[in-house]
Image (spheres, rainbow, N blue to C red):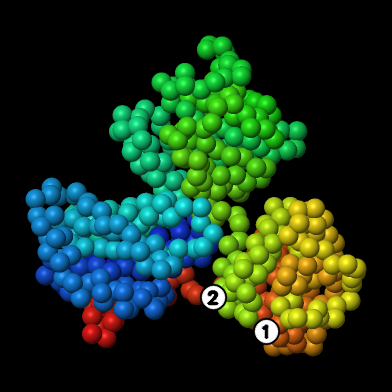
Amino acid sequence: MFNDRFCNLAIKNIYKGLVDGLSHFSQQSRVALIYARDPSDPLSIYDPQQLLKGHELRLKQLYFDDNRWHKTLLQSIEHQPEGHFITAENLQLAGIISFGGSSRSFFYQMWFTEHHPNMCSIHPTERWLEYAGWLMSQNFEMENIAMWSSGHALQNYATHAVEDHIVDIRNKILGIDAKMFIKPILDMILKLSKTKEEGYWPRGRLVFVDSEFLNGLNFLAKIKRFERPFTSNIKHVRKLMLAVEFSNRILVSDGNTIIGISDSPVPDYAVAAFFNGDYGFVEITGKPICSFFDGAFHSTSRKSKLVELESLLLDCKLDPSIATELFLVVSKLVHTAQNKRHGATLVLNLALEPAELSGHILDPPLDLKKDENFNLASSLIKIDGALHIMSNCELMGFGCLLDGKSILSENIGRGARYNSALRFTAEHEDVIVVVVSSDRPVSIIYHGIELNAHCVWDLMPGYLYEPKELKQHLNL
């Protein structure tokens, strides 16, 4: 009885820390767990927010149609020392990130969370779930009811999750003898991202290269050894960033000091920080693994994937090639508006004849597939009103006003641009409106409904949710 109660409390504590931490690192996130405390226990599921709803068939296939996983796992942990955590990787459920593992103190656990479409990389989140599994095993190895620091550790694990992934990648490339410490580098990146020089945020690339590999770079300017500024002197480093902004040059550091300025390609093993004003990205092997802004790391790529728009266009009565061209043009316009931090409205008219809109009507229309016309539209989008675009990517007008009768789905808190789009699409069947807010969110509106509206749920139930047997949950 005590073990069941202890198990439920430990799960709730770790679950709460995961939900809070991941919701700050990404957008609002749910979490679920499938586990068996002992090899003889039936599998149980803890899913208060129904994250795994819709995946029942796949879970049945994974856990019940073939029982070899249980025997393999039992053999793999039999001769492992106490405290050793054997990882179990992503189960590849659609829209879900999963990671878990096994140990002698806790037979099996698999943690799940949401795969948001605009993530730079899922790997820091995987490291987060892996750490949750390790903490669970440690709690049960000691069976100390006072060990409730696990949830607090998971709430603030963002920097460590990024560090863990970078260390894993570098170990694969360089071996486990890599000497450069990653945590101080990540702390320094955040401090630098918050430091202005003459009122401007930093721009350009700062690259951290192991001291033994510096000779492999071509330096345009190299600072004398005993004159090199320490990376802890953030103000000095910020001034040196002026030498690489708006260029292909990179500022090179060995993790402790600034070495100089190079024009070499960034090596795969190097940690690179790309500063782009008030935000930036951490990169390794040439790929972003997270972004940083507001003094913290985040999973977002800061580019809307527009998944709902792509699906809607492909489902409409358009030729697939035409739908693809329209999607690419609209995506580029949306990203242009987001990067320049201004609001915008795009009216996509899928009918054969253009809708009647008041505004600046063009004669002749502009073909947005041509670069010069697209560049012009990127400027016209800043003018109050909407761009009116046909399915063949022709721009019919700009500064267009949307009107319509009031509808029930309006949200007074979202402003005139959003609510006008709701009204207009409710009255025009073959029209999609894309609304870009100045603070970056994008709304896809069709038939008076926002298709990509976020569901609202409680981050944590106000009671101790009881786990269920997985068989009962799957109605087997």
Check residue 204 in the rendering and tell me which mark sits there, or answer none: none
Measuring 20% from the left and 68% from the top, which residue is drawn there? 36
For the residues labelled 2 and 1, say whether their Cβ atoms are less than 8 Å apart. no
**In the picture, residue 388 is in which quadrant?**
bottom right
**Place of residue 264 in the rendered image (x, y in percent of width and height, measured from the top left):** 55, 27
Front residue of 340/233: it is 340
Q: Quadrant of the N terminus?
A: bottom left
**Place of residue 283 in the rendered image (x, y in percent of width and height, measured from the top left):** 50, 41
Classify mark 1: helix, strand or loop.
loop
Measuring 54% from the left and 75% from the top, which residue is drawn there? 455
Where 140 falls versus 62 (above or below)?
A: above
For label 1, the crowd category at 10 Å Cα-Cα, with few meaning under 14, some 14 to 19 and many 20 or more, is some
Check residue 447 in the rendering and tell me which mark sits there, or answer none: 1
**Place of residue 411 in the rendered image (x, y in percent of width and height, measured from the top left):** 70, 79
Left or right of residue 6: residue 19: right
Residue type at mark 1 is: His
Where 307 falls versus 101 (above or below)?
A: below
**C-alpha separation, residue under disc 2 versus residue under disc 1:** 19 Å
Front residue of 133/171: it is 171
Where 263 falls versus 61 (above or below)?
A: above
Q: Quadrant of the C terminus?
A: bottom left
**In the picture, residue 321 is in which quadrant?**
bottom right
State whether residue 139 appears in this view.
Answer: no
Measuring 48% from the left and 25% from the top, which residue is drawn there? 254
Residue type at mark 2 is: Cys
State whether residue 365 appears in this view.
Answer: yes
Check residue 455 in the rendering and tell me which mark sits there, or answer none: 2
Classify mark 2: helix, strand or loop.
loop
For label 2, the crowd category at 10 Å Cα-Cα, with few meaning under 14, some 14 to 19 and many 20 or more, is few
Measuring 35% from the left and 42% from the top, which residue is drawn there? 168
Q: Earlier in the sequence, mark 2 or mark 1?
A: 1
**Place of residue 386 in the rendered image (x, y in percent of width and height, measured from the top left):** 80, 69
